[in-house]
Image (cartoon, grey):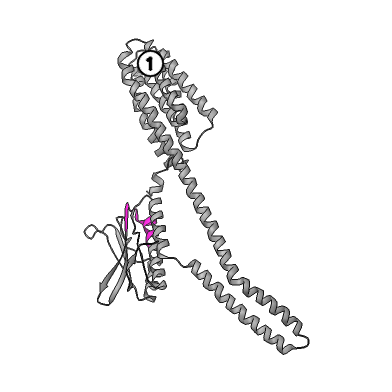
Amino acid sequence: MRDDEMSVGPGRMPGTARQAGIKLLWIGIWLAFMSAPVKDLADGNHTPWATALGVLGLLVFVGAYLVLVFRHTSKALDVFRVRAFLVFLGALAVLLSLTFGTRWLVLFVYVSVSVGATLPLRTARWLIPAVTALLVGVGATLENPREIITALVFPALLGGFAMTGVRQLVRTTVELREARATVAQLAANEERLRLARDLHDLLGHSLSLITLKSELAGRMLPDRPELAAAQVADIEQVSRQALVDVRSAVTGYRRPTLPGELAGARTALAAAGVTADVPAEVPDGLPEEAEEVLAWGLREAVTNVVRHSGARRCTVTLAPRQTLDGRVLELTVADDGRGASGNGPGNGLTGITERLAAVHGTLSTRPTHQRSGKGFTMVLSVPFESGLVSPE
């Protein structure tokens, strides 16, 4: 079972039936406090008709409570519906408590929790005490209310105000998710603008020169074909150089960098629910070819951890080491997952091995825990003759 199937964040609609069930279980587990009215009905203290109506009323109350809290903590309802639900729950709590007795006063605790979970703090901070006061007022009209009222006042206040904190957490999470999406969009827009500027700088002069020489060659062609041919040759040379410049620029955009992949690894592992230990330092003076190979290897390793390992923790280290063949830089990615599949190296590892061979590097793999055979560790090594510095 994957981690993304097991969890759904606050403020987010469940994407699968499994996620919906888990979230409903998290909300419904607090219904254990409904044991008092359930026991009252089970003890046979009421007539069959009254018991049937009590069961129906309790089911309606629980259903309305679950719909309100489950739906609102996934995607906020409009204010009118929230208020209608709260008024209905409050009225039903009053009716059932007055009809069946003090054991049913616990329903006011759920009304208070619903208020804290769905209303802004400026409203909830006075409405929660008001619901608690209503609990005391209704309880005062019943027989032997003192012990039950004393036992319920604190849970009603604590539960209501605790849910205001949960509501604020949901709101903050939603805003943070939206802010991340905005930052990602702004970064993409900035990258597009940078690409446009670079292409303009690369091609603007070349295309202008090609246009001028084409016009000049056209005017020379009837009377001085030899000069026109020279202009055409210049056009070919400028065009070839422009093509080289564009290819070089595109290669630079496509080439992965080690700092970028380290940041991407940290984000990908966190999103998958894997506890990540990723270094904040990057190599200084590492050749571009070797850095690119390590970046590709890190991307492949993290992808395997996220998709296939089932790991809870992943550690990435980047450190120089002295060997008999000279100084090398080792990139190690170790997880505590289920380990290698036993089907031999896949296409990803084969590709990384071929890339490493081009820069005289090596790849080795082993279980993270030698005794149990659990986990998977990948070590990429490339020649290196420099130190480490913190990124700017």
Residue 280 as seen in the image, left or right of residue 82? left
Considering every residue shown, the one lying at the far left of the view is: 371
**Residue at image location 27% in from the left, 60% down from the top:** 368
Q: Which residue is mark 1?
A: 136
* Total tally of numbered discs in the picture: 1
- Main secondary-structure element of the magenta-colored stretch: helix
Residue 334 position (above or below residue 146):
below
Residue 363 seen in this snapshot:
no
Is 360 or 304 nearer to us in this picture?
360
Residue 228 in percent (x, y) is at 71, 85
Amino acid type assigned to the residue bearing label 1 in the image:
Val
Residue 65 in percent (x, y) is at 44, 27
Residue 44 seen in this snapshot:
yes
Considering every residue shown, the one lying at the far right of the view is: 222
- Image quadrant of residue 342? bottom left
Q: Quadrant of the C terminus?
A: bottom left
Residue 73 as seen in the image, left or right of residue 382? right
Q: Tell me, yes or no, whether the highlighted magenta stretch contains residue 313.
A: yes
Q: Tell me, yes or no, whether the highlighted magenta stretch contains residue 8.
A: no
Residue 285 as seen in the image, left or right of residue 371? right
Residue 287 position (above or below residue 228):
above
- Image quadrant of residue 238? bottom right
Other residues around mark 1 within 10 Å, as few (<14) / some (14–19) / many (≥20): many
Residue 321 in percent (x, y) is at 27, 70
Considering every residue shown, the one lying at the far front of the view is: 392
Which span of residues is magenta-colored? 301-315
Callout 1: SS: helix
**Residue at image location 73% in from the left, 78% down from the top:** 215
